[in-house]
Image: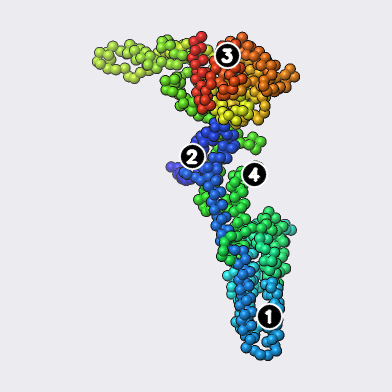
Amino acid sequence: MSRYSYGAYQDGPDPLAPPYDVRAALDAVGDAVLDGTRADEALRDLLRRGLPGMRERRGLDDLLRQVRDRRRQVRERGRLDGTLERVKRLLDEAVTAERAALADDAGADARLREAELDTLPADTAQAVRQLSGYEWRSPEARAAYEKLKRVLRSEVLDAQFTGMKRALQSQDPAAMDQVKDMMAALNAMLEKDARGEHTQDDFDRFMGEYGDFFPENPRTLEELVDVLARRAAAMDRLLASLSDEQRAELSGLMDEVMRDAGLALEMSRLTDALRARRPDLGWGTPDRMTGDEPLGLGDTTEALAELADLAALEESLGQDYAGADLSDIDEEAVRRALGRQAVDDLRELRRVEAELERQGYLRRTRGRLELTPRAVRRLGETALRRVFSGLESARRGDHDQRDAGAAGERTGATRAWRFGDEQPLDVVATVSNAITRTAMDAPPETLRRGGRPNGVRLSVDDFEVQETERRSAAAVCLLVDLSYSMVLRGTWAAAKQTTLALHSLVTSKFPQDAIQIVGFSNYARTLQPTEMAGLDWDMVQGTNLHHALMIAGRHLDEHPDFDPIVLVVTDGEPTAHLRPDGRSRFDYPPSPDTLVLTMAEVDKMTRRGAGMNFFMLADDRRLVSFVEEVAQRNGGRVFAPDAERLGEYVVSDYLRVRRGRRGR
């Protein structure tokens, strides 16, 4: 017998896993698009707000708020001049103790020493340097001065290497020798890498010998460079943030301690190498701390490094620069600043964006996100549901009906099915025919014993279909004003939603109809379904209804046997027309040529038998006068709906016209 073993699928994602649910995200994007927002802006707003329907994941704005709070906390941690203050205090202790010891000595040597102390420079670094060769008479003074040098050396080195403070707190000379060896080996490794000769084995050997100095536990040379460069740049920003006097003092102290330790050359080589490898870290950029507690040099450097990381993270989370993308956000920086939960939130946001693309709802065109036809269909359905939900129940005449055919309206009569029929089956009549036939074909003895035929078997002759009337097709033209005034009046979002709703209604409920959407401003153009979701208003002058009617007329002429339906949504009278050379001419108030040419196209529509129904989104006197004249010449109707109910008016009017023409 064959043996089988079962386990988790290893070859990529589970092929049987249900698709990731992005419906809530898609609907949120769709709602924003229907309200007039572009698809890419709608997705960006969703990612900023977060995903309340998807395990309450936080958005970029919440993460950004946390980062700003963290920056404020770091700034309030302390002052930058803590090391200078501590060195000055220890220096004062040493000098005070030495003066006390000299005061009890009446000799000339004591007076000379006092004179030397009196001439110490006010600059702390110069004073420390001048006292480097001084023979201390007081043991307490000598101890304070030695402590000053140890503190300064450990602070300066800890500012660059976080793991050195503990090693340097001991007074073992071997500890300092190990520091020297480490820095020499590090510089040699960086120079070898610059020549292209470095290997991972070199790094592993280095970490095996000196890993205690690097508690961050970097795994590669690049990770080590990032750690060291981050702190070196922070030290550089610390110096830039001090006053000129403080900067001179601290720089002098650092130089003195590096020379005294024999590390000046190696530290200079290291700083130059780090600056060359990571010039992007804001070297020399001033920063500030606002706390009251004086901080040591290492703590200050760590705080400034964290502030720099938080500033970079704030910029990437803000996504306010050209070409911004969620992939720009450093997960490790998020984890350091905000913790693991924030990383999970970020990954969820990335997954939503990726899944919307992978499942075919979004696509990138020339670096810009757009809705796909699949998403536009869903958007149109949503817009249509919005429209029907706003209609009064007494006026509703259309409901979701997924099992109806498209062959026509049912008359209530049935007939036998014939090959090629597309009418819906009459299930009850078909099954009744089968039962009757089966009973007639059953043997008489079976019926005399009270038996029943064994099941019902359908035959071709049993099938009946419901008779329907012929339903005529319509050529539908929706002309939508795209001029800037639609935005100023707050009617643009309603016009977009109406366009999507009508297109969805026609293509889903009346697929035999031919619909054309025409947008017009200074020029007119035909709009495809995928364009409509990302459709934006035109910031130009002109309402060129003349051109829009010309395009709509060609659509009607291409469908001569269809019933013509022309719907116009606008908030202003015609102010532009096409000249003989094809260019647009704008005039306000409208020129006589514009009105004459536009009315000529209206008359052509009348001769085609196309009634023009206008939906006015403003009550301007000129617009009212114009549409009233069109209604008189064309026989169409005029509506003045509120913007919120525009979709209801347009859809209802289309359905009214369609019902009035059924069966013709």
| 500 w.r.t. 251: above or below | above
Q: Earlier in the sequence, mark 3 or mark 1?
A: 1
Horizontal and vertical percent position of residue 423: 46, 14
Q: Which residue is mark 4?
A: 321
Labels 4 and 3: the sequence-earlier one:
4
Query: What is the number of the mark on residue 117?
Result: 1
Nearer to the camera, 16 or 603: 603
Q: Is residue 18 visible?
A: yes
Mark 3 closeness class: few <14, some 14–19, many ≥20 residues within 10 Å: some
Q: CA distance from mark 3 to mark 1?
A: 106 Å
Residue flagged by tag 1: what amino acid is it? Leu
Q: CA distance from mark 4 to mark 3?
A: 51 Å
Whole-percent x, y for residue 266 in the image: 71, 67
**Which residue is disc 3 drawn over?**
631
For mark 3, give the secondary structure: helix
**What percent of the width, then of the height, locates residue 1?**
43, 42
